[in-house]
Image (cartoon, rainbow, N blue to C red):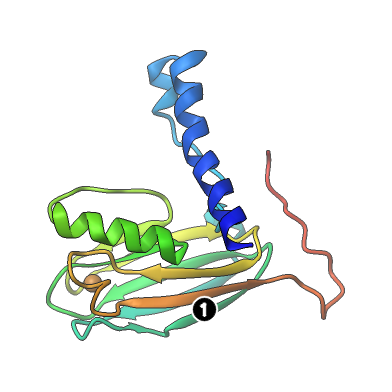
Amino acid sequence: MARVFVGVAAVAVVMPIARAHSDHALSTARAVVKEQKAWGIAGDARVARRTVDVSMRDDMRFSPQQISVQRGETLRIRVRNEGKVMHEFVIGYPADNAAHAALMIQHPGMEHDEPYMVHVPPGKTGEIVWHFNRAGEFEFACLIAGHYQAGMTGKIRVTDRTVTGRPATDGNPK
Ligand SMILES: [Cu+2]
């Protein structure tokens, strides 16, 4: 099952690039693209009804270490860096985060920026607005060189609404 999901994620990464190279001008390819990932899609802050506060510390721990979400929710995730070094909050599959973290060891200065990640300097607060429209078990992690390896990770569990009876609508333009 996990393998199937990883395959879908890989396709989602490749497709926008293929489009950009065919029928789109370079300028439009640079526009903000809400790209569907296996763990959701960039959210609209206006429809975020819940804010989750997460703190990051130099002991390489997040607090809380688990976030529970109902599929269809848009969360405002407010991430505060309580440490003295840079930290970041990146959502993904554990395998993707692990691969990315390994790359960060090789290239510590490597810049990366996606709507599902935020880099937060010491003492500052960053924010992600993310629409969780796929159920599953995901991970949030700090990919700064050495931090992931030191255990700076947490879990995001996205479940379908089965108790309330409200259907879990996707609510996203395709
Ligand atoms: Cu960190």
Residue 165 location, x and y as percent? 87, 74
Is residue 140 found left or right of 101 in the rendered image? right
- Residue named by callout 1: 67
Characterize the local packing of mark 1: few (<14), some (14-19) or many (20 or more) Cα atoms within 10 angstroms. Answer: some
Is residue 161 found left or right of 128 in the rendered image? right
Three-letter code, disc 1: Ile
Q: Residue at x 36, y 76 (%)?
A: 153
Q: Is residue 22 above or below residue 67?
A: above
Q: Residue at x 48, y 82 (%)?
A: 66
Quadrant of the picture in which ligand 1 is shown = bottom left
Is residue 90 found left or right of 11 in the rendered image? left
Is residue 86 or residue 95 the one in the foreground?
Answer: 95
Quarter of the image where one finds residue 135: bottom right
Q: Secondary structure at mark 1?
A: strand
Q: Is residue 125 above or below residue 134?
A: below
Is residue 42 in view from this perspective? no
Quarter of the image where one finds residue 60: bottom left
Is residue 142 or residue 95 the one in the foreground?
Answer: 95
Is residue 25 in view from this perspective? yes
Residue 157 location, x and y as percent? 58, 75
Is residue 43 or residue 20 the one in the foreground?
Answer: 20
Quarter of the image where one finds residue 88: bottom left
Q: Is residue 38 above or below residue 135?
A: above
Is residue 171 found left or right of 101 in the rendered image? right
Q: Residue at x 18, y 49 (%)?
A: 110
Residue 149 location, x and y as percent? 25, 74
Q: Residue at x 55, y 58 (%)?
A: 39
Screen quadrant of the N terminus: bottom right
Residue 58 location, x and y as percent? 18, 82
Screen quadrant of the C terminus: top right
